Amino acid sequence: MAENLSVLGKARAEYKPKLPKSLRNGPLKALINSGKATESVRDQEKIKDLFPNTYGAPVLTFDASEEKQTAGGPLNVGVVLSGGQAPGGHNVIAGIFDGIKAVIGGSKLYGFLGGPSGLEEGKYIEIDRALMDKYRNTGGFDIIQSGRTKLESTAQFDKCIEVAKKLDLNAIVIIGGDDSNTNAAVLAEYFMAKKVSCSVIGCPKTIDGDLKNEYIETSFGFDTAVKTYSELIGNIERDANSARKYWHFIKLMGRSASHIGLEAALQTRPNICLISEEIKEKKMTLEQVVFSIVDIIVARYGAGKNFGVALIPEGLVEFIPEFGTLISELNEALAHNEAEIKNAGKTPDMAEAACKHISEASAKLLKSLPEGIQLQLMLDRDPHGNVQVSLIETEKLLIEMVAKELKVRAFKGKFGALSHFFGYEGRCAAPSNFDADYCYSLGYAASVLVLHKKTGYMASVRNLTAGIENWTAGGVPTTMMMNIERRHGADKPVIQKALVDLNGKPFKYFAEHRNDWAKGEEYLYPGPIQYFGPSEVCDITNYTLMLERNAIK
Ligand code: FBP
């Protein structure tokens, strides 16, 4: 038996990811077309000032050409996996590996270890064919691991320059989410300003699905992660429908946007699914959110159905306006008075210390919360200044508050609630065929951008619902996706997050059907991801992408 490979793993190792037509004859036969000069999505003047060398670059698309370009010398490329794991990362690396080797055999791929810190500290391995072959079509980021170090100071950038020079790098490819791709763009700009001839290219990764726009149709990993969660939710729905005695409160990962929750709802049709963006839009208080859940529980009980399934997006608390204000005030308070708050003692003392630096209303809200949640709200921010919502037990907070409200309403039934959190269960799943192909294509597209010395770009593969025959590949200037946001108590250029569009088709479909799903048991049981079998089963993407691209009605 092959070492470390399950029966499926062995079969999966043989899978040959598909490429868009423009890349099938190799990077040397991919012709680049340049579009018009571009602008950032917002704050154009400020972004232009911050990125004088890379701002305004055109969108690039590749075409298959008959003519073969000359290779020049071997390409040396370094790759970084940054941020949370997402299925398909290994295939992006495989795409870069195969791409640069197809340019010229002597090209080398270095993997920086443990995320951006590996690049800064010059910790790397050379990825050779034997190593690469062990990881093709597998989930996880374990080939070189990941990390969340933020590269932002000139001292860090200078260290990256030393490493790039030492390894004689033609390019660094940073595979990450919105924050990591922002870092990549800042690094690209710095290299240009310092006349360092090493490109910096990004790749759109995140299970959260919030790094998307006209040119980046989806971030990789979303498809596989949601399918994995949907399998589990479907299993729970069937259990709930069999036992008929529990309410399952399931929190789903997705730091900010509710794309994962929404897609899981489309795949499984639960009785309740909260969408953070809608709650914010309607300016709902926590109490109103709780009441909306209680109304459904009471109505189902009245119909003899004292059970159900509720999906809760991980980022919910930040979208409830009163909580959003509390969190941003705590962000500022922690950014400027961290030692005072952290050293105050136990949770109530920390809260007391924090309350000195926040508004009266926020202080009142903080103190009204269970101690566990108070502490979770004051935990360290991630290196990008975000509150770590995966550590806030919103599902338990909601259960507690729903139970209280049911008492107030003299609920006759027994409220048997169970909490779940699905996040880490899906981030390293073996990539679906879609993610395997998409990731490999993104990596291959990155190798073409490297070959053409393009910098400050994100690899892009589009037309994803039209069948792989019609997929197109290219590069999008990262500055084009940027705006200015408040982070760590300061204004920073960042890639604009794509939240759930309440006028978009995925939300509208959900909104049209949710009342029926609340009352009945219209559950769907999607079952596990299929890797082998008919194309209509194995190669389908997800409802979000299909509805957004008008591939289904
Ligand atoms: P990225 O934005 O880096 O892709 O990570 C997203 C995510 O998976 C979120 O959904 C989650 O809140 C967070 O990572 C968890 O972070 P950590 O892996 O550090 O626990």
Image (cartoon, rainbow, N blue to C red):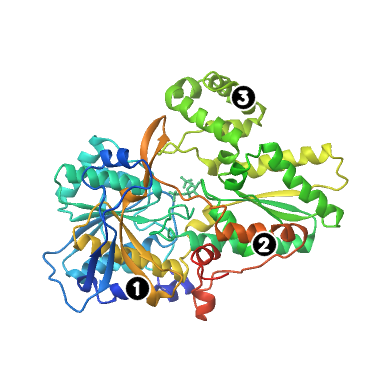
Instruction: Report, in whole angstroms, how far the alpha carbon at label 2 lies from the one at label 1.
Output: 33 Å
For image coordinates 23% across by 35% down, the residue present is: 155
- Type of the residue with mark 1: Leu
Q: Secondary structure at mark 1?
A: loop
Give the answer, above or below, for where 6 lies relative to 520. below
Instruction: Provide residue 437's location: percent of width, then percent of height.
Output: 40, 70
Residue count near mark 2 (Cα–Cα under 10 Å), binned few <14, some 14–19, many ≥20: many
Residue 249 or residue 146, whichever sits in front: 249
**Residue at figure coordinates x 42%, y 34% from the top left:** 486
Q: Which mark is residue 341?
A: none
User: Is disc 3 surrounded by few (<14), some (14 to 19) or many (20+) residues within 10 Å?
Assistant: few
Name the quarter where the N terminus is drawn. Answer: bottom left
Tell me the element at label 3. Answer: helix
Residue 525 in view (yes/no): yes
- Find numbered disc 2 in the image and state the secondary structure of the residue it sits on: loop
Position of the C terminus by quadrant: bottom right
Query: Compared to 54, does 339 lie above or below?
Result: above
In three-dimensional space, the C-alpha distance between marks 3 and 2, rounded to whole angstroms, equals 37 Å
Q: Tell me the residue that label 2 is attached to.
A: 269
Q: Which mark is residue 361?
A: 3
Residue 106 locus on image (x, y percent): 16, 67
Q: Which residue is mark 1?
A: 19
Question: Horizontal placement of 382 versus 233: left or right?
Answer: left
**Residue 379 x %, y %:** 51, 33
Q: Is residue 45 left or right of residue 410?
A: left
Q: How many numbered marks are there?
A: 3
Between disc 3 and disc 2, whose residue precedes?
A: 2
Residue at the farthest front position: 36
Task: Tell me if residue 14 can be seen.
Answer: no
